[in-house]
Amino acid sequence: MKRLIEKWKKLNKFARISICIVLGITAYRCADFFPHTYMWLTHHPQMYNAELEPEFPSWFNVNFGSLEGPDTNKNGIRDDVEIYMNREFEDLGEGEIAILHQYARMIQNRLKYPVGHEYSKKHWEERKHLYACIFILADIKATASSRANYKFMNKDREFVFRKVINSLSRDLREARFMRQFSGHSTMSDSSFWNFVHLEEQCHFSKNYSDTLRKDFFIKKKKAFGKYGKRFYDSYERKYGKSKRYLYEDYID
């Protein structure tokens, strides 16, 4: 140990800084090596949502392959991230899980597509709809002491983000992709439209969507009063009548 200290003292300032940088980068890149490898050695695929989850990929496969990483079941979520999510969120409700899976796919796509790709416009629309879905659930689950806001599920989303963006190269790629949206707004233009399209935009099941819609339409009917038909006429002029069957029973 003393010899190492003596050798360290003999190094010039540049050499010391270089060694520290190399060690720092190595430590950052390998921080999750042991927990990841433990998961790889002990994992046995289980059934989730009537589907068998993939094999847990090795740390080297995740970190030394492409930025997107392995996705053997082609569901848009990296295999290790999917398995971590299955374990972490097994007690969450259907709506929350659907949103988190959608969020994971969205983050994954930031690594898949380069800046300026034609997907970029679609990505921002997906992001707007995602936040609309989050706000819908936040509003439903809000209490007198917990106001609905965009921080709903913030810790869960942070967990997913850190599992997907688990290296410096992924962090830089994701940041570069998102810089192209500087100044954009995530606000959606119609909360009513979002409720009409819950299955497509939030990826909720039909039964769950119908339950949410029923409560929402009942509240809207009371709020609109005698002006309800005027609202629906205005809405249909902008968005059409293809989804009228969902809310026609609530039009006075």
Image (cartoon, rainbow, N blue to C red):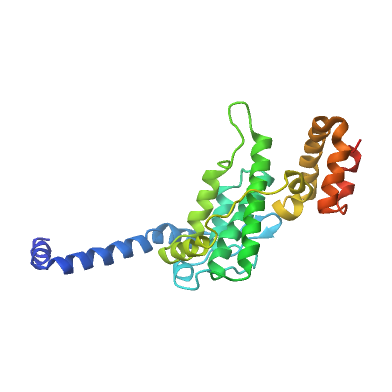
- List x then y, in percent, for residue 181: 55, 59
Residue 30 shows in the view? no
For this rendering, which residue is in front, 71 or 227?
227
140 lies left or right of 196: left
81 lies left or right of 244: left
Quarter occupied by residue 9: bottom left
142 lies left or right of 215: left
5 lies left or right of 31: left
Residue found at x 55% / y 64%? 110
**Relative to 43, does residue 90 appear above or below in the rendering?**
above
Residue found at x 52% / y 57%? 182
Quarter occupied by residue 12: bottom left
Residue 86 shows in the view? yes
- List x then y, in percent, for residue 1: 12, 61
Q: Residue furthest bottom?
A: 65
Quarter occupied by residue 230: top right
For this rendering, which residue is in front, 203 or 88?
203
**Relative to 56, does residue 90 appear above or below in the rendering?**
above
- Quadrant, the C terminus: top right
For this rendering, which residue is in front, 173 or 230?
230
